[in-house]
Each structure stands twice: as structure tokens, then as C-alpha cells.
Image (cartoon, grey):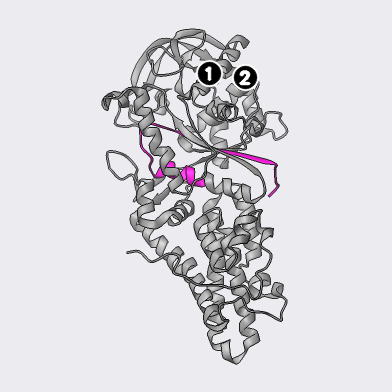
Amino acid sequence: MKLKQKFYISTPIYYVNDIPHIGHTCTTVAADILARYHKLCGEKVFFLTGTDEHGAKVAEAAKKEKLSPKEFCDKVSKTFSDIWPKLNIQYDYFIRTTNPDHEKIVQEILERIYKKGDIYKAKYVGLYCVGCEKFVTESDLVEGKCPLHPNREVIKQSEENYFFKLSKYVPILIEAIENENHPYHYKISPESKKSEVLSKLKAGVNDLSISRAEVSWGIPIPWDKSQTIYVWVEALFNYYTATKITKNESFWPANLHLIGKEILWFHAVIWEALLIAAGLSLPEKIFAHSFYTIDGQKMSKSLGNAISPQELIDKFGVDGARYLIASSFPAETDSDVGWEKFSKKYNADLANGLGNLVARVLTLAELNCDGQVPSVDHNPDSHPLRIDNKIHNWKKVWQDVDKLLSDARLSETLESIWKFIAEADKYINQTKPWELAKKNRKEFNWIIYGLLDSIHQIAWQIYPFMPQTSIEIAKQLGLEKLLIQTPLYKDSWTNIKPGTKIEFKQPLFPRIK
């Protein structure tokens, strides 16, 4: 991939009317994997996540729990900030939209847009979904209900609001998306989501109501304190205000907003129009992934089928959970998962796949090479696992890692790595090194050296996905110091050294029932 000096990646800021579930986990784990990968590429990385804490839904949820909105936000926001480190997610900043600095910066930007003449006051009459906190049209509804909140009635709402001249920026946005040479060009991925946005833009877009007269739990409009800023407007600015709050302005604009498909319009249209109006640079790319379904059903509170990140950790361990999330990442289409599917994949790919390969090779070396990397007469680069074009060798895997992770194709990246794991297992079965240990020592050493080298390449390749497992393999190969001190990309790991002490400790992934 083409390296940059910096990489700024964000998740959505999660709405605090709910506690963390597998949908939130999917996006945040994916963002951490990509952040780690770009760090390995030698880039400076800023990784942002956080919580969205204003709006009618929050006030409603707080009232049910007999808490003030701020007390409720403090309680729920902590469930997000606390769980991510348990999954070894290393975000750089956790933003909350109740942060006074965020509120102040948003007001300043909005006033700038208002003085420019892009905001005006008018009466709005329309249908409103409280669950989505947005106005909807008849065409958005399914049998008169919001498809995302079918158990809630949409309400007819009429009030005087402030409007942003979104329609003014539609021609600019269309050209910015389609023309790679446009000064405001930005990418929308996958391609189907880009087509979806362009189709909607070309069909015609109305101006956007950006204030609420009846919602007190929000940031006041700076020139009219009787109204608050629409939560979906002020929340978007978190991606910018976070860089100001943390004094990381050099990271702006964002390189990648990683989001779920249900909030694509806000991030791929409204956000960019607001930025242009405010005179700020646009993000480089928006990637909108699809959803998880659970055993063929939509995940919902009423069905009680949500899977929490803590439940995943308890059953599969941290790296097991990260692997299962990444390998089922719903990039372009929805991905169906469930406890039985996860358990089968864990056993097949981790216990019987990666874990078994590491155990087989290290045990062979311990029993027959005095627990050391053997010396070889052959040129290590001539090993068939490196050069044979008939097999999926580790150099091909590195090419796939570079290509696929640059486009957030996590599951395909893992498929390439696991194809190589299967080839290494197949190579052991074909060469039968245990039979060569006494018959042909040079040949045996050459085979074991190549397999040990293959394992260390695999450890490096899985580092963004499963960092603990990667380091554990490095420890067993005597490479821990190299991995920890110089994580500057794959070229840091050239060859393993003959004579290095190795030690097989225990299975990386015990089978589960």
C-alpha cells in the first residue's frame, strides 16, 4: 500500500440509549485492527471512538431510570469506555458529546455557517421517528413504520426550526464523489453504498432541519437559546472537535470514517456539506459496513438475541473474540452469526488450524533439534513454502494483506492467511519430517527451518487481528524482543536465526464444547 505520514480512523460515536453489543463491537474491533496495521506500516495513527449523548431518546431513557440525563450518560458511556480495553482495543481518545469543549467548538462552527447565510428559520411539518431521532418520508416507511424501529409509532411533528441549505451543496457533492480530481473529492465504500448515495442525491434533496424547539437535552443554538442543535448535526462534528480538544489538529481531515450502513447518509452527505459550508477539509473515505444477523434473525431487544462483547470474551477469550468478529466482518452484505457458528469456527480455524500448526512444528523442533532453530545448508529463500508458485506462500499473503486491508476487507485478509496455514499443514503431511529426523538430517533441518519461518511470518501477519496470540507465538520462537521493540512492518522480520532457543508451552486455543 502507499504509505502516508499519518492515519486518522474513527468509529461512530455510539448512542447511549443502549449498552455495547456485537454491532458496536464489530465496528470498534475492525477500527482497532486497521489502526494497528497502519502503525505497523510506520504511520502515526489517531484512533477515535466515543459516545453520542444528546437528544430526545437519551432524555427519555434517563427518565425511565429516574436519572438526570447527565447521570444516565455518565453511567452508559462508561460501559463503552470500559469494555473496549478488555478487547485489547487501543483507542487514542474517547470523546463524549457532553464535553464542554465539544459543545463550545460546535457552537462556534455553526455560528460561522449561520453568518455565511447557509442557515435560515422556517416552519417544518413532517413525520418524525424518535428512535432514529430524524424526520422521515412516507417512502422511508414500511407499512407505516420505520424499518429500524417497527415497534414505535412515527409521529407527525410541526414546529419552527432552523434549516441548513443542504440542497445548495448537492451539485458539489455529486461532483466531489464522482470526480477523483475534484478539490473536495472523497470516497464512499463499498461501491454499492456509493451508488446508493449518488442515486439519492440525484433524485433531489431538501434542506435539513438542524434544530429542535421541544428537545431541551442538547447544545443550545448560539444565536437562539430557545432551541437546541439537532443531535445528528452536532454529533458529526465530534470527528473534528476531538482533534482540537486533544491538540491533534495535524491529523485532520480523517482518513477513514468506519460506520454502519444505517448512518451512511449522515456521514456521506450531511457531514461533507456542513464541512464545506464551514470551510473545513473533507474526510478521505467513508466505509459503511452491513449488519450482523443472529441465527437468521435481526438482532433486537425484544428477541433478546443480542450478543455482548463480554460474553464473547468469556467464551472465546480476547483474541478468539477478535478473530471471530473480523472473520465474519459484514463488509458488503449482512453476516449471519450465532453461538453455534462461532464455536465451530473457533474450533476449526483456531484450535485445529493455527493452534495445531504451531504445536506440531514447535514439538517437532523441541524433540529433534534440542529446542533450537536448526542450522541449514540450503538458502532459506529457496524453501518451497516461500517460492513455490503452486502453493499459497507467505509472500503472496503479504501482498494480500497490503491490498485487502487498505480497503477494510478483513475477512478476505484472514482467508488468505488461513489458506497459507492449510498449505503449511499439508506440507508437513506430505514431507513427514518425523521420518526424516534420523534418516536425512539435512533435509529434516531444512523442512523444520522453513516451517518455523512460516510460523513467524504468520505471527506477524495476524498481529493486527490477534496481538496477544502474535506475541505469544513470538515468545515461543524466541522473537519477542524483535516484535515488541521494532514493530515497523513486515520487513522487520527477515529471517529467524539458527540456534535461537524455542519452547512450546501450551496450546494457543484449547478446543471448546
Please state which of residues 243 and 396 is positioned toward the viewer in this rendering.
243
Question: Mark 1: which amino acid?
Answer: Lys
- Count of numbered marks: 2
Foreground mark, 1 or 2, reads 1
In the rendered view, tell whether residue 376 sits above or below residue 162.
below
Q: CA distance from mark 1 to mark 2?
A: 15 Å
Q: Give the residue at mark 2.
A: 278
In the rendered view, tell whether residue 233 sits above or below residue 485.
above
Q: Quadrant of residue 511?
A: bottom left
Question: Mark 2: which amino acid?
Answer: Ala
Q: Quadrant of residue 299?
A: top left
Spot occupied by residue 331 in the image (x, y as percentages of width and height): 51, 46
SS at circle 2: helix
What label sits on residue 389 in the rendered view? none
In the rendered view, tell whether residue 426 sits above or below residue 245.
below
Q: Quadrant of residue 426?
A: bottom right
- Dot 2, crowdedness within 10 Å: few (<14), some or many (≥20)? some
Q: Residue at x 57, y 87 (%)?
A: 437
The first of marks 1 and 2 along the sequence is: 1
Residue 252 visible in rendering = yes
What label sits on residue 104 in the rendered view? 1
Spot occupied by residue 478 in the image (x, y as percentages of width and height): 58, 68
- Where does the magenta region start and end? 1-30
Please state which of residues 137 and 499 is positioned toward the viewer in this rendering.
499
Q: Describe residue 299's horizontal placement relative to residue 471 as left or right.
A: left
- Dot 1, crowdedness within 10 Å: few (<14), some or many (≥20)? few
